Image (cartoon, grey):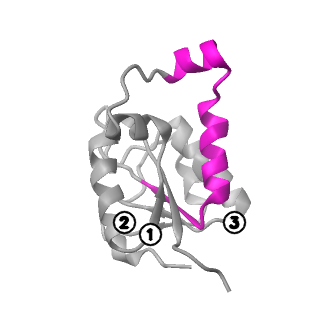
Amino acid sequence: MKSGKTKICICGSLAFTDEIKAIDQELRNLGFEVLLPNGVIKEITKKPGYDPVAAKRNSGYDAIRDHFKKIEQADAVLICNFTKRGIENYIGANTFLEAGFAYYLGRPTYALNPLPDQAYIHDEIMSLDIVVIDGDLSKIKHS
């Protein structure tokens, strides 16, 4: 039997950092361990100068691979999807990639809000068995 808290890896655009910070706290209050994107961690801890492109160029840092490792460690994934660029419940390229990786690993994947009507990923995102929780974090199951 598994010991410890259920680990949730949050995925979403860094444009949603403020929303993700609030969701992080709510998930922790519900008894989850939360794995966050490094850009959000930098904002929470107020570490200045985080630039994933420059970090990769200067130190070999690979943000995508780093977040994939967090998805591997997690028991489940939560996609934080809000309105961006006029697209309601936006899921960007990196988040879509992360959702596909979670699907490949067999991780339960939740979307905070309904899936977007984005033509270039519509059929693909619908095939990933994502559970929409309509903003209700209590619908995420502890493992």
Q: Give the residue displayed 58% in from the left and 52% down from the top.
A: 99
Nearest the viewer among 91 and 143 is 143
Direction bottom: furthest residue: 1
Residue corresponding to mark 2: 28
Question: Which numbered disc covers residue 32?
Answer: 1
Q: Earlier in the sequence, mark 3 or mark 2?
A: 2
Nearest the viewer among 97 and 11 is 11
Q: Decide: marks 3, 2 in contact (CB < 8 A)?
A: no
Q: Amino acid at mark 2?
A: Arg
* Residue 137 in view of the camera: yes
The answer for how far apart the CA atoms under marks 3 and 2 are is: 23 Å
Q: Earlier in the sequence, mark 1 or mark 3?
A: 1
Local secondary structure at mark 1: loop
Residue corresponding to mark 3: 106
Direction right: furthest residue: 104
Q: To which quarter of the image does residue 86 belong?
A: top left
Q: Amino acid at mark 3?
A: Gly
Q: Decide: marks 1, 2 in contact (CB < 8 A)?
A: yes
Nearest the viewer among 45 and 7 is 45
**Front position among marks 3 and 2:** 2
Local secondary structure at mark 3: loop
